[in-house]
Amino acid sequence: MYRHLGLTGAYLVWTALFILLGGAVFGSLVVGRWRLPKFFLLYGAAFFLYAVGWTIAYFTLRETPGEWVGSLAGSILMVLVFAAGFGALRLTVTLSAVLFAANSLGYFLGSALNNYVGGKSGMLLWGVIYGLCLGAGIGAVIQMSQFQRSREL
């Protein structure tokens, strides 16, 4: 994708795919008022802000520091949207920690596998590991946010 779309184009395509595919998958976890298609708006805003935070940090700081700060900034921004949408702002710090841990684990473990295996197989492993860990973190955040809201009601 880098060759055909450039760095910015590739990031935009990946963001769109994460929003479309992730929104469909994570929408099945939602009960009540945020059921599809409203959830797509919430998830789209959350993931877009995640991508913006990650990308700005990475392009500003570059390499490993940019990746760590991007993971943190992106995780916090995504959690703020979910916490506000589900009425669980009191859990923002806890949810941010959960998502940051899952996000970072997937990203850096995937990166290590990519570096070890190399080539297209390494890149595929990176994507699978990153997707599974980030997905688990997002799923946990959605469930925890809803659980907090239902307990308060």
Image: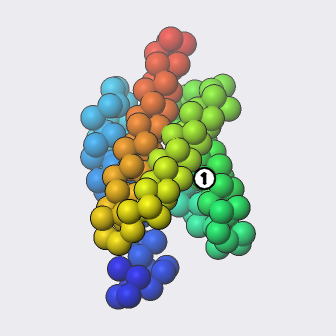
Q: Residue at x 28, y 43 (%)?
A: 25
The N terminus appears in which quarter of the rendering? bottom left
Q: x, y percentage for residue 10? A: 41, 76
User: Can residue 107 be seen from the camera position used here?
Assistant: no
Q: x, y percentage for residue 149? A: 51, 20
Pick whichever, 28 or 94, lies toward us: 94
Q: x, y percentage for residue 17? A: 33, 62
Q: Quadrant of residue 29?
A: top left
Crowding near pointer 1: few (<14 within 10 Å), some, many (20+)? many
Q: Secondary structure at mark 1?
A: helix
Farthest residue in the bottom direction? 4
Pick whichever, 123 or 28, lies toward us: 123
Q: Is residue 78 left or right of residue 37?
A: right
Which residue position is annotated with label 1? 71
Q: Quadrant of residue 94?
A: top right
Q: Quadrant of residue 62?
A: bottom right
Q: Residue at x 55, y 28 (%)?
A: 87
Q: Residue at x 38, y 88 (%)?
A: 3
Q: x, y percentage for residue 45? A: 49, 53
Residue 145, relative to residue 20: is it above or below? above
Pick whichever, 24 or 131, lies toward us: 131
Q: Residue at x 33, y 26 (%)?
A: 31
